[in-house]
Amino acid sequence: MRRTSHPLWRFSLRVYRREGVEQACLGLQSACGADVNLLLLCCWMGIRRKTLGEPFLRRVMAAVSRWQSEVVQPLRRARRALKQAGIGAPRAWRVHLREHVSRLELEAEYVEQRVLARLAALAPPRPRSATAEQAVSANLENYLGLLGTPIGVAAKRRLQTLRSACLQRRG
């Protein structure tokens, strides 16, 4: 399958490369159970001044949860396991296989983003937020609220890093 670019994917690649974003997203994934693609969707819709309500967020979470649990997460676990020396395969083989698994994991993330972009086009109309910053904040807070994990100081810091990065001008 040939990967074609789309606005959510381009936005995600651009923002994810910014300083501190990868660590912030992975920290939220680890501490709160957040899906990085959903975090990026919240930001993408927010910079377009579109707020996402809980019913819509529940719908997109449900739409990708099985993909995440049955495809993306097993690939991630396999990639991480291949880093470890004690799994009984020579290092060179593990490195080679890990590169292949990493590419597959990225393809799986891309597929999820295509699904999310399609669903984003179906988001119910809501009053536009006054600012992109307000919409990004509301979307992230609504999403993390649905995860049911208390948001501590570290998570707030990570959210601020993500908000700041997605609100930067291109660069």
Image: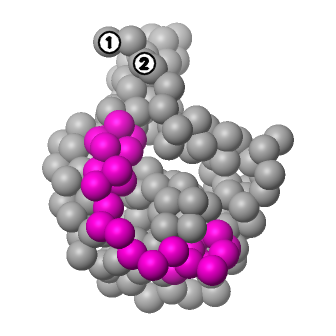
Between marks 1 and 2, how big is the CA–CA gap?
6 Å
Q: What element carries label 1?
A: loop
Q: Which residue is found at the position 19% from the left and 53% from the top?
A: 63
What label does residue 3 carry, if any? 2
Question: Is residue 117 rendered to the left or right of residue 155?
Answer: left
Q: Which residue is found at the position 48% from the left and 12% from the top?
A: 96
Q: Please state the extent of the stretch shown in magenta in the rendering.
A: 112-139
Pick whichever, 148 or 170, lies toward us. Answer: 170
Position of the N terminus, as image quadrant, is top left
Position of the C terminus, as image quadrant, is top right
Find out whether residue 132 is within the magenta segment. Answer: yes
Residue 39 in sight from this viewpoint: no
Residue 62 in sight from this viewpoint: yes
Q: Main secondary structure of the magenta part?
A: helix
Q: Which residue is found at the position 58% from the left and 35% from the top?
A: 10
Pick whichever, 155 or 53, lies toward us. Answer: 53
x then y, percent, for residue 166: 68, 57
> Where is 117 relative to 28, above or below?
above
Q: What element carries label 2?
A: loop
x then y, percent, for residue 167: 72, 61
> How many marks overall?
2
Pick whichever, 92 or 70, lies toward us. Answer: 70
- The quadrant where residue 27 appears: bottom right
> Where is 116 relative to 125, above or below?
above
> Where is 5 relative to 78, above or below?
above
Find out whether residue 15 is within the magenta segment. Answer: no
> What residue would you read off at disc 1?
1
Which kind of residue does numbered mark 1 sit on? Met
Pick whichever, 5 or 151, lies toward us. Answer: 5
Q: Are marks 1 and 2 in contact (CB under 8 Å)?
A: yes
